[in-house]
Structures are given as C-alpha cells and as structure tokens.
Amino acid sequence: MLFTTPVFLFCFLPAVLAGYYLIPARLRGLRNLWLLAASLVFYAAGEPSFVFVLCASCLANWAAGLLVGPGRRGGRAVLALAIAANLALLFRCKYLVFAAGECNRLLGTGFHVPDIALPLGVSFFTFQAMSYVIDVHRGVSRPQRNPLDVALYVVLFPQLVAGPIVRYETVAEELRNRRETWDDVSAGVCRFAEGLAKKMLLANPLAVVADSAFDGADWIPAAAAGGPASTAMAWLGALAFALQIYFDFSGYSDMAIGMGRMFGFHFHENFLHPYAATSVSGFWRRWHVSMGTWFRDYVYFPLGGSRVATRARLLANLLAVWALTGFWHGANWTFLCWGLFHFTLIAAEKLAGWRPEGRGALRAAAGWLATATAVLLGWVLFRAASLGDALAFLRAMFGRGGVPLRDFASALLLREHAAVFAVAIPLCFPVAPALERLADRLCATPGRAAVRAVLRAVWLAFLFAASLSFVAKGAHNPFLYFNF
Amino acid sequence: MRNRLHQTVAAVALLSILALGAADGVVRLLAERRLEIPYRNGLPDGAREALVTFNGLLLRATGRRMVSGTRHADVLRLDNGQLALCPLARTGRLRRKAVRDIARALAGVRDELARSGTPLVFVLCPSKVPPGGVGLPAGMEDDDNLLADLLVERLGQNGIDCLDLRRRIAEEGLDHASLFFRTDHHWTPAAGLWAANETAAFLRDRHGFPADLSRTAPERFESRRIADRFLGSFGRRAGLGYAGSEPFDAVLPRFPTDFAFDVPQRSLHAEGGFAEAFLRGIGPTNSLYQASYYDSYLASNPPFVRIENRSGGNGRTLCVVKDSFACVLLPPLAIHYGRIVLLDPRLDPGLSLFRTVRDEGADAVLFVLNPNSLIRPNGFFGRRFLQPLPPDDAP
C-alpha cells in the first residue's frame, strides 16, 4: 500500500488514527498493539507472503537483543550471528538473483538463478533491526523485554517501506512513554500534507520528464543510437530526475515524519536541503541523513573512520562505505558505480582539503556549481537501467553519439512542466524557512498572526486538495525509494 | 503559539478534507438508500469526480497541453482546443511494415470474396487530427495521417476499393473540427450521417447498390439533444475543469422507419423506429464521468450485431467489419439496405468473417475503420477472423 493511494488516504489512515485515539491513552500497550496490527496489515496489503518473514525477523532480533547486552557472555558471537542473519536475509531477497546471474555471465558458472521478487522495504527494516541489536550491544539502548515493542519499532508503518531508517535509540523511550498531544497531531498532519504535495505536485510530473528522457515515450521519436533524443533532452532529463528523486524521497520522509508525529513519535529529519551544499561531503551530510549516519556509525566509525594512521587506510574505509552505500540502493552495477563515483569525489575532497563553507561567496558559488554538476552526473548512473545506457546518456549530455543539440520533444516537455520546474528549483534551497521567518516578522501582532494562520491553512488545504486530485486521477505515481 | 494556531487551523482543514471524502460515500448511501457505496479504488465516486474536475482546473491554469500525466497514450489539446490522443512516434519503417501486412491481408480477403462475386470496400474514417497535423505542437509528427496516407496508397496498389473520407472532407470544404466531439476522439452523429451518405453513394456508384440519397439528406433528419452536458473519453481523462462539457445531439430521421436490431450474444432484440432500435439506453445520467453516450450508441458497441431494415431498403445485405467510429455511421446507412451485419473482431476473437458472409448471405463486405484501430500489438483481426473456410464450406 502506498501513502499516495486513495485506499491509504481515505480508508487506512483515518481508520488507524480513529482506532488509535479511541483507545484510552493509559492503555499504552493496547495502542501499541493497534499500531503493530495496522502496520502488519499495511505491509501485508503489498507483500502478503513476506509478512511472516518480517515477523520472524522481528522475533529473532528481539531474542538476539536479549542476549547481546554489554558484558553478557557470548554477546559478541550472538551479535555477529544476528548481523549475519540479517545480512543473509537481505542478500537472499535483494542480491542473490543479481549475484547468481552475474557469476554465470562473467565467470561462466551454472548457478541456478532463482525467481525472487524484491520484498518491499527490505533494506530499511533490515537496517533498523540491525540498529536495534547493535545499539543494545553497545549499551546505547536497553534491551526490550516485550517482543511486540521491538516488532513495532521495526514495522511501524510510516517508515516501514521507504524509511527514514529510524535508529532504535531515537524512539526507544517513545515506544513506552510517549505523550501524544494535539500539537504533535496537528503538526504531523501539516507535515504529511507538505510531503504529499511534494510527491504528487512536484515529483510525479518531474518523473514524466525524467522517464521520457531515460526510457523514451510513445510520442517521442527514438534516437537512432538509443538513449535520449537530443543533448537538450539529456540535460532536461537529468535535471528532472535530480529534482524528482529529491522531492519523491524527501516528500515520503515528510509524510513518514508527519505520520510518526500523529502517533506521538519524533523521527529525525532526513533531508536538509542537500542541493544547497557546496561540496559533495556537504551534500551527503544533508541527503538521506538517516542512511548516511547509519553507515557512518555502524560501518565507517568501526573501521576507524578518518582517524587512521595512513591515507591508504582512510581511502579503504571510504571505499568500503561508498561501495556498500551504492549496493544498498540496488543490485545493479549502476548503483555500485554511482557509489564509487561519490567515493572518488569525497576522497578527492578529503585529500585536497576542499571546504568551501564559510570561505567567501565566490568560493561557495564555485563549490555549489561543481557539486551540483557532479551530483547531477551521478544521478545519471543511478537512474540508467545499465552501464551502457548510462554511458549513452552521458555521451548525449556532452553532444556525443550523433544526437542533435535539441529536439521538439525537449522543448515541449519543458514548456509543459515549466511551472513545476519554476517551483521545484527554488524549493531545493532553504526558501521556505526564510519566508517563514519573514512572515513571523511581518505578523507580530495577534490579529496579523491570526490572518496568517488562516491564510497558511487555506494554502495548505489547497495544496492538499491539489495533491488528492492527482491521487484521484491516478496519474503517474512511481515511488523511487520503495524497493531499496 | 503562532505555530500552534496555524497548525491547528491547517490540521482541522486537512482532516476535514479527508473526512469529507469518506463522508461523500455515506451521504450518497443515505440519499439514494442504497446498500452499496459507489467506491472505486478506495474513493467514493462523488469525491473522486470532484477531485478529477479540480485537477482539470489546475492543469488548465498551468497551461498544460498534455494532460494525462503519463508517457503513454497521453491526451493532447490541439491548437483549436479540441482534445486528441497524442500521436505516436512510429518510425516510417514500422508504419510501412504494419500497413504492408494489413494491405496483404485485405488483398487476400478480396480475392477470397471475389470467388463468390462479393465486393470488398474499405471506408477510411478520419482521425481527430486534420491532415497535415494542423493544431499539433510544432515538430510533432502527424502519425495518424501519415499512417492513413500510407494505407490508402497500399490499398490502391493492391487494387482494393477505398473510400478515403478525409479526402471527401477536404473536397467538400467541411470544417474538420466540427465533425468531431471536442472532448472525445469520435465524430458526431451528424458527421456519421454525412459519412453514411458518402458510403452509400460510393457503393452505388462503384458497385451498383441502389441508394436514394434524397431519403437520407440532412434536412430529412432532426437533431435531438440527448444531454446538454457530455464529457467524452478524453474529457473524462482530463477532467471537467480542463475540458469543459459539450452537448450530445443525436440525429433522427423525420420519416418513419422500422428496424429489427439483434445482439445474439446478449440476447438483445429490439424492434421499432430508428430511436428504439439504435439509441436504446441513451439518456441523461447523474454523473458526467459515467455517462458515455457515444459508447451507448448501437447498444454499447457489441462484437456482433444484426440490423434488419423492414421499411424498404434496397434488399441488399452488407457485412461490416468495424471499430467504434462506425457506431454513428451505420444506423443511417442501414436505411438504404435490407440488412447489415456488424463484426468487431477485437471484441470477440471467435468471429469468422467468411462464415458470417456465408451465413448471412452478404452482398458486400465493408471495412469501416480508422487506421489506428488496425495497428494493435496482437493485430486487429486476430488469428481466426480472416481464415478462409475449408473448400467444401466456402461461400
């Protein structure tokens, strides 16, 4: 079930909210049980056969949590076993088909290539489960005696299928002792509406442009050599995809954070205007923060991080993290190459000591331009179906491969979606917070504040209705991070 | 405090929208005292239609011309405001291959029919986009007419009789757009009457099938408004707010007619005048989005229909292979003939042309089609439709 389907918006979410708040607040366990049941129904609606594996994973990680506490005998062995089991599940679901197929292709082996459909959100809930066991082992969190609470942490539907990857320590206390308030509920509803608007009003139209450039469309003549129809189309498609993936994923995160607040949970922010970064390292401190910090805390730091004796070791640590980051996104060489591309950029920045932040506007502008271009080119690797396709696309971007400079389709697509680009590009920067601050200054008196509150509510209601109109219409609605 | 205020107001507004959407179904249930709520994909019909209308307004406000929001089968607004299907970007090679295969198949049918002296005529129905791609965005290829041009050329090369109605529209100086609904890809019943007269004249002049065209002159028909507000298939996709509605007018003869209308697969039998036979079930409905008047024409486009003219046609029998464009052409055409049998092989893969020709004693076979209908992934005719009968079973 997607957040952007009518069934979720008009049936599931209202029913879960109503049921949740009909249970008296003092019956915390019952409220948690209701949320757990709802989350399993949510997951089963999209992945009925895998829901039992999900339950088994929760149970196994809960049991491991009881055995890995600091100072417990055999804790390290159990931790290793738990991590291995989680990774094995991830490998089996996500990488086995790819690994067997590529072995057969490259090494001529004869492995059986099983037919395994990727279960929804497997990367997210596996990482969350590992986070729980590792945090308990490190003594950061106390083990949960109640398996239902561990299960609720892992399967809580707002973040189950597309993150953010909530760390156990973030919600450990709230699982038992949260206090739901109207402030949280109302803020959560608003945040959810903003996320839905990002997804439906920006990401989805941009997806049409990106998909047309990368995959072609019925009405666009195919280029003779495959790939985009022109150089203009290639740049337009790359830009559209960069914006699409940002608004798609950050919109989903907004919805998840908003729904979490509706039920009294407070998840960390996942996106901090990444496209405003002036270095690639800065970009990764702002992009998919929950994943970045996960790899930092559970892979990079344990390997020694940047506090190592030699540059070679530093590079090896970075390489490990970025290869894993790439592969985490999908079982395809394109994702690995995308990860290695970012490894190269970050390693170069670290070795060169590149830090444009706070060193003058010109340096910051140059840093932004270089970062934006590099990230844009990286997204081509990420989006392309194969390395060959990515190469053809990149060649078209730089006028190679015999494609014309422009074509009617890119002009038409740009004209059709000009309004979307005009809104999306400024929103990549901290424009909204700046406007909020300005509005705060202008509306200092109670009367003006009330007018502002009403206007803001009307605006949000308009955005919400506009988003729902696209939901109702059932327009192009892909969720990019659904399968990661 | 300020945050609290706007969040509260906004949250109440947003939750109200959700509640209204869900409540719509309940209200309908109470209003109509029905036990079933018209839900589709988790959203009550009323709420969904209101949202789709609003969506249309948004698209219109942002100046969009391509309105489905998908890469496939998008709806396109032409320069004159008409909605059309975005032309496909077929390569010339693909078009040539498709047309060559169709022309070959039709030449085979023509030869087979010639054994029993039954003529074959192809009536080419025009697409919404006028020849030359007038009204398309600059640079977009006019696939429909390129395909039609190629088909006409190939049919000519194969010696197949073809009535190209696009050419007749140009020769008569008719306004192409006025022949079509603005929000639907089909032509109007009035255009269907014009096309029926053209077809009857063609059959009379080329094949000697008698037809008194003065009987079906436009002035002998009257227009009857079925609905003031009609939303065609493209309008339903784009939303009322984008497309706006238009009236739906049927054309009915002012003189008495008597038909028998049979759809054997649905056990449907109707008798009576033009309206009773052909316009059954067409009438105003509560929802613009659910009223498809054109599709209701000719009993909702069934795969096999038999029309008996009991009020003095020329006694000849036509077997017509058709797509939906024929729905408004055939009723007035039936006035000239004794019997018309309609076949749509897309809707029933078990149909056989030659068996029908034999069983019904057809005097001529017409293919009344828009060229786009012929280009389908699995072929228009299917595997069995054009298979000749065994020698001892031939017509």
Image (cartoon, helix red, strand yellow):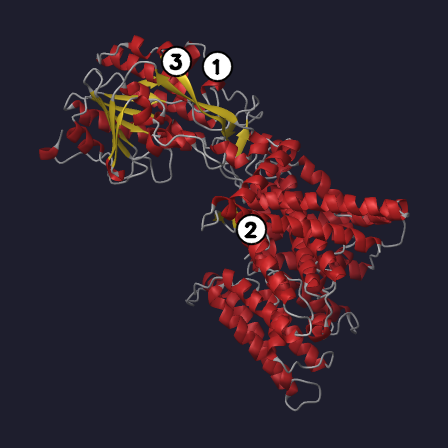
In this view, the residue in front, B215 or A409, is B215
Q: Which residue is mark 1?
A: B175
Assign a secondary structure to mark 2: helix
Say which quarter of the image contains residue A58. bottom right
Please give the chain letter of the residue carrying mark 3: B
Q: Nearer the viewer, residue B74 or B131?
A: B74
Look at 70% across and 64% down and name the residue there.
A290
In the picture, the quarter occupied by the C terminus of chain A is: bottom right
> Which chain letter goes with mark 1?
B
Q: Is residue A58 above or below residue A247?
A: below
Cα gap from disc 2 to disc 1, whole angstroms: 43 Å
Q: CA distance from mark 1 to mark 3?
A: 11 Å
Question: Could you say where residue A317 lies in the image, as x and y percent from the top left?
Answer: 71, 69
- The residue carrying pointer 3 sits among few (fewer than 14), some (14 to 19) or many (20 or more) residues within 10 Å by Cα, namely few
| Cα–Cα gap, marks 3 and 2 | 48 Å
Circle 3: element type: helix
Please give the chain letter of the residue carrying mark 2.
A
For the residue pair A357 and A276, the one nearer the viewer reads as: A276
- The amino acid on which the numbered mark 3 sits, given as a three-letter code, is Arg
Callouts 3 and 2 in the same chain = no
Give, as a three-letter code, the residue at label 1. Answer: Asp
| In contact (CB < 8 Å): disc 2 and disc 1 | no
Q: Are marks 3 and 2 in contact (CB under 8 Å)?
A: no
Question: Mark 2 highlights which residue?
Answer: A6
Image quadrant assignment for residue B203: top left
Between marks 2 and 1 in the image, the one whose residue lies nearer the viewer? 2
Question: Which residue is farthest left?
Answer: B392
Residue A80 image point, x, y percent:
61, 81
Q: Is residue A477 left or right of residue B363?
A: right
Residue, disc 3:
B168
